[in-house]
């Protein structure tokens, strides 16, 4: 097999999916705040874990803000660390 034949299947794996736009970046989007528990719960799983950005389609900057806000809300007992 040549090198060209080996690398070809990986080129086919590229999908034609469009990237989702960040739901927290447009001007009318709500501000990320640790006191807004309802917003923060949308970005956590039912077990209490933070949803990764490849699933939530949030930009890297907003994902960092979300993670900080969720951790702060957990520390202040506004959100649970783990849901059993």
Image: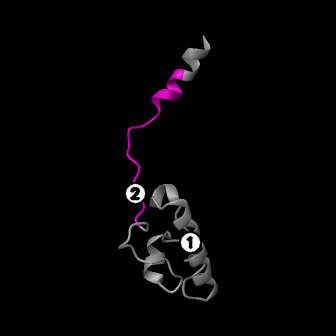
- Measured as percent of width and height from the top left, residue 19 is found at 41, 49
Say if 11 sits above or below 22 in the image.
above
Q: Residue at x 61, y 82 (%)?
A: 72
The residue stretch that appears in magenta: 8-23
Find out whether residue 17 is within the magenta segment: yes
Which residue is situated farthest in the top direction here? 1
* Front residue of this view, candidates 74 and 34: 34
Label 2: how many residues lie within 10 Å, few (<14), some (14-19) or many (20+)? few
Residue labelled with disc 2: 21
Residue labelled with disc 1: 65
Q: Quadrant of residue 84?
A: bottom right
Q: Secondary structure at mark 2?
A: loop
- Measured as percent of width and height from the top left, residue 60 is found at 55, 60
* Front residue of this view, candidates 58 and 73: 58
Say if 82 sits above or below 8 in the image.
below
* Front residue of this view, candidates 16 and 43: 16
Q: Residue at x 60, y 79 (%)?
A: 81
* Front residue of this view, candidates 59 and 75: 59
Q: Secondary structure at mark 1?
A: helix
Q: Is residue 82 visible?
A: no
- Measured as percent of width and height from the top left, residue 66 is found at 54, 72
Say if 36 sits above or below 42 in the image.
below
Q: How is the image coloured?
A: one colour
């Amino acid at each position: 097999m040549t090198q060209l034949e080996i690398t070809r299947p990986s080129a086919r794996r590229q999908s034609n999916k469009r990237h989702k736009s960040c739901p927290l970046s447009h001007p009318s989007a709500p501000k990320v705040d640790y006191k807004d528990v309802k917003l923060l719960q949308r970005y956590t799983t039912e077990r209490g874990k933070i949803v990764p950005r490849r699933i939530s389609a949030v930009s890297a900057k907003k994902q960092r803000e979300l993670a900080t806000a969720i951790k702060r809300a957990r520390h202040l007992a506004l959100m649970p660390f783990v849901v059993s």
